[in-house]
Image (cartoon, rainbow, N blue to C red):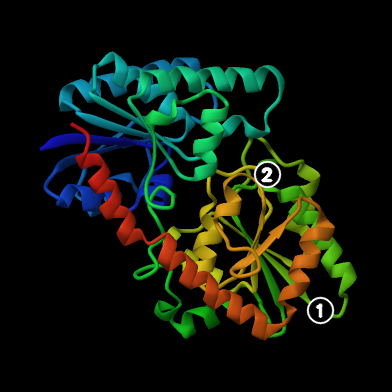
Amino acid sequence: MKNLLEIINLENSAENFIGDQLSFLQNSGHYNVHLICSPDDRLELFAKEQGVHFKAITLKRQIDIWQDIKSFFSICNYIYKNKIDIIICHQAKARTLAIPAAWLMRVKHRIIFAHGVLHETMHGIKRRLVLLNDKILSIMATNVICVSKHVMTMRVNDHIDKASKQHIIGNGSCNGIDVENRFNPDLINPDNLTTLRKKYNLDNNDFVLGFCGRLVKDKGVIELADSFGLIKKRHPKIRFRLLIIGEPEKRDAVPPSVLEMLFDSPDVIYTGRIDHSEMPAHYMLMHVLIFPSHRDGLGLAPLEAEAMEVPALVTKITGCRETIQDEITGHYINLNPESICNSIELYFDDKRRKQIGINGRHFVSHSFSHEKFKTEILNYLDTLE
């Protein structure tokens, strides 16, 4: 049995992006699975639920030289003590520290799980430094798994990876979408929806626009705020509500004035970060999801929303375009308020909205099944000698 280590920045990212893939690999009998991520109150419980070994090691998003050095040697020590055979590194900081550590400790299979293309919206010296870092890490890695065809293409075009080193699991993503046991409208108790609607003071006549993601510029939060203001001006007789799920971050921060405008509006419902188990019911409060991202490896929110029969409006750029079928499960939007509002107006028609929602669930079930993904990643790992 091989020792497999997955390393990712945060515990909630481990739950959202990897989930029970850990227990599936552990229970396959092929792997003894380990998990490293930053300290969190839920880490021990999550690891026990998955039946895997774990270690809390601080992995800060921002550069912290002294902390990063300590974390690097802690990773090396864990690899040595547990005789790790395969390491899978998710997210930028985990890759930056763990791939060199695995290379130094002579781990046989060193896998980068590329969730996106970080430098895509960067310019100047910052872009060059990030590209250089990714190229060095790719040289140290033995394999690269990409979450989408877009990520594969970008990394080859930017000379980060050789195509022969890359792989994509199924149609992409890092764990598929659990359309049976989690993102399934049939599992939602109507009483729970009623309770949520009361909690957020939602009226039956409200038209709810949804957003789920980090509140940063790259996620299109500025365009989201502008389009919300415009749609209200265009249709003053309709009460629009904007349901925002996510938290602001320092890196790529949205101007404080934009956040203040959103948070102070009586028509905006701001939930902050919520538990992943609560997401399905929250999606069902939405008439449509807006995902105006400037860059994304794939974009899980649109896929999750579609699985819950909620149409998604996404930008036709980067990996976002792979998350919908245009005019069938949602619509492509441009990064300007007029385009976003034009697409929102298409969903005032209840019959059309419901049919596109049904199409969306069929699309995700067929193309991004969580169960299929788990089997395919196990098969992939089994090919590593």
Mark 1 lies on a secondary structure that is loop
Residue 252 location (% of width, % of height) = 67, 35
- Residue toward you, 239 or 296: 296
Residue 72 location (% of width, % of height) = 36, 19
Q: Earlier in the sequence, mark 1 or mark 2?
A: 1
Residue 191 location (% of width, % of height) = 48, 84
Query: Which of the two marks, 1 or 2, is nearer to us in this view?
Result: 2
Q: Amino acid at mark 2?
A: His
Q: Residue at x 74, y 69 (%)?
A: 344
Name which quarter of the figure residue 162 lies in. top left
Which residue is denoted by mark 2 in the rendering? 294
Q: Residue at x 48, y 30 (%)?
A: 92
Q: Residue at x 13, y 44 (%)?
A: 30
Quadrant in the picture for the C terminus = top left
Looking at the image, can residue 282 be seen? no
Residue 228 location (% of width, % of height) = 79, 62
Which residue is denoted by mark 1 in the rendering? 238
Contact check, label 1 and label 2, Cβ < 8 Å: no
Quadrant in the picture for the N terminus = top left
Q: Residue furthest front?
A: 164
